[in-house]
């Protein structure tokens, strides 16, 4: 390797120092040291056919002294021009960039970064131009060591103000505001940086502040800084080399960041995986391999995305199922609480009336007929209520098991409605229940089940009209094959947000203690109506209250099992 103080280091190969004087050839390392470039650049020139060689194997070559002299001789003292003659596009730009070039390089390992930075700045320092190195302490030390090896007098260049070294992190902190580079502060930094280097023909800057920003996860700030470099170039002409470690761009999510970073530069230098390949065919093979890897990665990413989407759907389904199960458990617990209360009330009343009658009889020894009749009426009423509640629970069980059945027979529906309304009137003194039916209207229905539906709807009308009022029952035949039964009250109605839930099991549209039931009446009624082949709807008139409408075919199926409820 040439001595840094020898003529060879200054760009003048002569017989006094030349190792090829005796043997007539150079090795790749010797030519690299002679010209102050890296071995990678020599391999590039050989691969491009700009430097003839004699091969002794795949990577062992001999370069004749005459070939080196022939190329270098016309440009002695002008090392950058020699590089343009020899170099490919990457090396030429690195060794003699134009005043407004903005280069970016990517690297996997630090030696390639150090060699490339030295290729970029060493020719400028040797020819008397100005250089600024804005880098991390580790990289600054590596670059200066390589500069000395390449024969650059670093101390003299620094003393002359042609070589300025700045810490990348400290320089970055001078113009960052709220996580983004401030344009005015950045321009002040560039102005001072170029002023510190004095006057000269050329300014070359190496900076890795953008790499620090990407490493910090602030990619937007890095792209903004790249743009600011481009904006200040017309004011302060310089050539700039930026560098990023390729590891910061791992992952499909950073593909756009890499593309955006490249778009801010005039030239891009790929990592050593490609740049260090000496043969053109080797590079083509590497490109082909990278294309295959990219295609494979795209397929893998697509498959992973598909799996992730399936996983997300499964998780969403699992969460929905869990929420549904938790809601069902809450509903069950609430139902059990309500059902126990509803069942306990008539049992308590029946027990209390029986005890009261027994005590009076034991105390007086006489049987009070009038009081006994009142007590028995109360017991009967509560027993009917208890029977209805138990019947509803049994009906729910039958619905779930698909065993709720109809026993349809020919029935006078007008008489059935009149009888049911009459029975309901005896239970209230506060409500006026009117009924409008034809004199006779025969249909094929299950009379007990249809009476159960009408009783449920009348009970609701009375319960949710606590201040009394009119309840209107209308039976009609709108078509030859259709029966319509409607029950209208003028009570409290149902809130709009609750209306689409009222036919669900256990649902309570009203939570007032006096109006609560088990939430089964409308649910069971809907199942019975649908078993008849009909449907039941709820209407909510503007003047208040609720109107339930049951529409049934005139001839229901004789027997039809229900499907299990959803």
Image (tube, grey):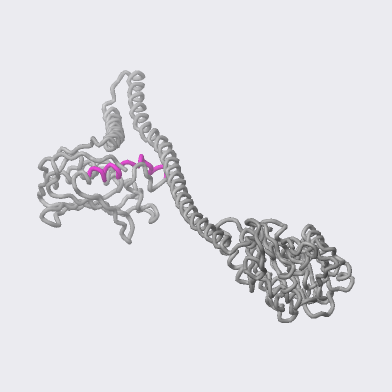
Percent position of residue 49, x then y:
63, 69
Q: Is residue 13 above or below residue 334?
A: below
Percent position of residue 220, x then y:
64, 65
Percent position of residue 178, x then y:
71, 65
Tell which of 322 and 541 is nearer to you: 322
In which quadrant of the rendered view does residue 208 lie? bottom right
Q: Is residue 208 above or below residue 187?
A: above
Rendered residue at 18%/39% (across/down): 406
Tell which of 417 and 524 is nearer to you: 524
The image quadrant where one finds the N terminus is bottom right
Rendered residue at 28%/27% (across/down): 372
Tell which of 211 and 471 is nearer to you: 211
Residue stretch in magenta? 512-528
Tell me: 154 left or right of 286. Answer: right
Q: Is residue 467 above or below residue 396?
A: below
In which quadrant of the rendered view does residue 144 lie? bottom right
In which quadrant of the rendered view does residue 68 lie? bottom right
Tell which of 25 and 483 is nearer to you: 25
Percent position of residue 255, x then y:
56, 62
Q: Is residue 42 visible?
A: yes
Tell me: 231 left or right of 130. Answer: left
The image quadrant where one finds the C terminus is top left
Q: Is residue 164 visible?
A: no
- Magenta stretch, main secondary structure, is helix
Q: Is residue 24 magenta?
A: no
Rendered residue at 72%/57% (across/down): 110
Q: Is residue 513 magenta?
A: yes
């Amino acid at each position: 390797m040439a001595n840094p103080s020898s003529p060879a280091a200054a760009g003048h190969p002569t017989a006094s120092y030349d190792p090829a004087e005796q043997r007539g050839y150079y090795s790749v390392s010797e030519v690299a040291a002679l010209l102050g470039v890296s071995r990678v650049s020599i391999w590039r020139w050989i691969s491009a056919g700009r430097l003839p060689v004699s091969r002794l194997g795949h990577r062992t070559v001999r370069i004749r002294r005459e070939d080196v002299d022939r190329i270098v001789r016309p440009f002695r003292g002008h090392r950058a021009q020699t590089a343009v003659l020899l170099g490919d596009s990457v090396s030429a730009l690195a060794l003699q960039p134009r005043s407004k070039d903005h280069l970016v390089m990517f690297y996997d390992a630090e030696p390639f970064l150090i060699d490339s930075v030295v290729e970029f700045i060493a020719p400028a320092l040797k020819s008397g131009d100005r250089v600024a190195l804005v880098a991390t302490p580790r990289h600054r030390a590596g670059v200066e060591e390589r500069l000395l090896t390449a024969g650059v007098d670093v101390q003299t260049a620094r003393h002359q103000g042609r070589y300025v070294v700045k810490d990348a992190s400290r320089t970055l902190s001078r113009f960052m505001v709220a996580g983004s580079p401030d344009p005015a502060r950045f321009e002040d930094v560039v102005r001072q940086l170029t002023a510190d280097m004095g006057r000269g023909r050329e300014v070359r800057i190496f900076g890795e502040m953008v790499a620090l920003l990407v490493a910090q996860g602030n990619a937007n700030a890095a792209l903004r800084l790249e743009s600011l470099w481009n904006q200040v170039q017309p004011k302060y002409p310089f050539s700039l080399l930026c560098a990023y470690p390729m590891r910061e761009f791992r992952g499909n999510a950073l593909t756009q960041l890499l593309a955006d970073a490249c778009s801010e530069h005039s030239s891009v230098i790929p990592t050593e995986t490609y740049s260090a390949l000496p043969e053109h065919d080797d590079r083509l093979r590497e490109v082909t391999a990278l294309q295959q890897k990219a295609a494979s990665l795209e397929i893998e990413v697509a498959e992973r995305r598909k799996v992730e989407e399936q996983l997300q759907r499964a998780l969403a389904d699992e969460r929905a199922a869990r929420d549904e199960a938790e809601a069902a458990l809450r509903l069950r617990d609430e139902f059990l609480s309500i059902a126990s209360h509803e069942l306990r009330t008539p049992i308590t009343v029946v027990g209390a009336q029986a005890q009261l009658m027994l005590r009076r009889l034991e105390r007086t020894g006489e049987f009070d007929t009038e009081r006994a009749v009142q007590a028995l009426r109360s017991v009967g009423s509560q027993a009917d209520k208890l029977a209805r509640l138990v019947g509803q629970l049994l009906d729910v069980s039958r619905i779930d098991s698909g065993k709720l059945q109809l026993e349809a027979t020919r029935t006078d529906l007008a008489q059935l409605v009149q009888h049911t309304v009459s029975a309901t009137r005896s239970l209230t003194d506060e409500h006026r229940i009117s009924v409008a039916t034809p004199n006779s209207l025969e249909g094929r229905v299950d009379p007990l089940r249809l009476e159960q539906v009408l009783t449920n709807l009348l009970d609701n009308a009375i319960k949710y009209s606590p201040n009394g009022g009119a309840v209107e029952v209308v039976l009609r035949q709108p078509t030859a094959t259709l029966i319509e039964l409607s029950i209208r009250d003028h009570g409290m109605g149902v809130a709009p947000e609750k209306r689409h839930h009222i036919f669900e099991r256990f649902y309570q549209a009203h939570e007032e203690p006096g109006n609560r039931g088990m939430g089964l009446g409308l649910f069971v009624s809907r199942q019975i109506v649908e078993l008849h082949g009909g449907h039941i709807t709820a209407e909510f008139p503007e003047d208040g209250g609720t109107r339930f409408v049951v529409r049934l075919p005139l001839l229901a199926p004789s027997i039809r099992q229900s499907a299990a409820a959803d």
